[in-house]
Image (tube, helix red, strand yellow):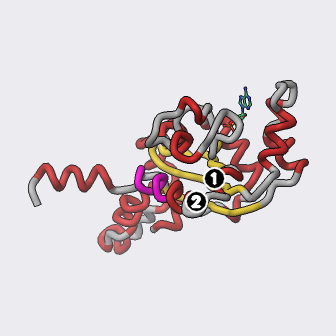
Amino acid sequence: MSADAQRAEGERRPIWWMQRESGGCSASRQLGYDPAPFAREELPRIMAIERTLSILKPDATERPGATGEILRRFEAAGLRIIALKKIRLSDEIARGFYAVHKARPFYGDLVKFMTSGPVVVSVLEGENAVRAHRDLLGPTNSSEAPKGTIRGDFGTDIERNAAHGSDATATAKIEISYFFGAAEILAPVEAL
Ligand code: CMP
């Protein structure tokens, strides 16, 4: 393999690969070095490893093949799925999730749409995950989203826009805990 190809291969490798490699060093094991704290605390800091919440909305989950294709795109972009479930939101859960929009005129319709069918909720982890995920989604309004983006390919308009993604790491933390308990999320150390 050429030097360029080796470098490209290295850049393509996801975080779990690096964690596995750091944990797989027998010399460090023999020395009694525990790589877990490094993988858990230092690597994310050095590499800006973030977590974000993704919701595939009812218009996406009802389309045959769309759920698999969208999750494939997340993984192909280096985002690791560390929690995943398919659920039907209750009126109360949908209202609570979008409470920040409750004064907006579209709130009622948004809640009605989000409870109209199953959603696929996941936690994605990776370098700059919030931005990376939103770039894959494209603009909020599907009618303005370019082809090749998830909202452009699977959504219709600003309400039926196929997917939701957290807009910042602080929001992601709140949104993730809204849907997942700690025991449902794979910790980085589990990749070792
Ligand atoms: P989402 O990323 O789930 O966050 C809030 C949602 O509100 C957004 O995607 C849109 O689906 C919806 N939304 C935002 N603005 C409008 C609007 N003007 N009319 C209808 N729905 C909207």
Ligand 1 falls in quadrant: top right
Instruction: Please name the predominant secondary structure of the magenta segment in the image.
Output: helix
Q: In the image shown, does 157 or 191 lie closer to the viewer? A: 157
Please, what is the three-letter code of the amino acid marked with disc 1?
A: Ala
Point out the image quarter for the C terminus. Answer: bottom left
Reading the image, the residue beneath label 2 is 67
For residue 31, which numbered disc appears in the image? none
Q: Is residue 79 above or below residue 149?
A: below
Vertical arrangement, residue 105 with respect to residue 33, above or below: above
Q: Is residue 3 left or right of residue 8?
A: left
Query: For this rendering, which residue is in front, 77 or 28?
Result: 77
Nearest the camera: 147 or 29?
A: 147
Span colored in magenta: 72-77
Q: Residue 100 appears at what percent x and percent y? A: 80, 31
How far from the left and from the top, in percent, is residue 14? 39, 56
Compare marks 2 and 1 and give the one earlier in the sequence.
1
Characterize the local packing of mark 2: few (<14), some (14-19) or many (20 or more) Cα atoms within 10 angstroms. some
Determine whether the residue tagged by mark 1 lies in a helix, strand or loop. Answer: helix
Judge left or right: residue 163 versus residue 188: right
The spot of residue 119 in percent (x, y) is 71, 56
Report the disc number at residue 60.
1
Q: Are marks 2 and 1 in contact (CB under 8 Å)?
A: yes
The residue lying at 84 percent from left, 44 percent from top is: 112
Q: Quadrant of the N terminus?
A: bottom left
- How many residues crowd mark 1 within 10 Å: few (<14), some (14–19), many (20+)? many
The three-letter code of the residue at mark 2 reads Thr
- Looking at the rendered structure, the secondary structure element under dot 2 is helix
Q: Is residue 177 magenta?
A: no
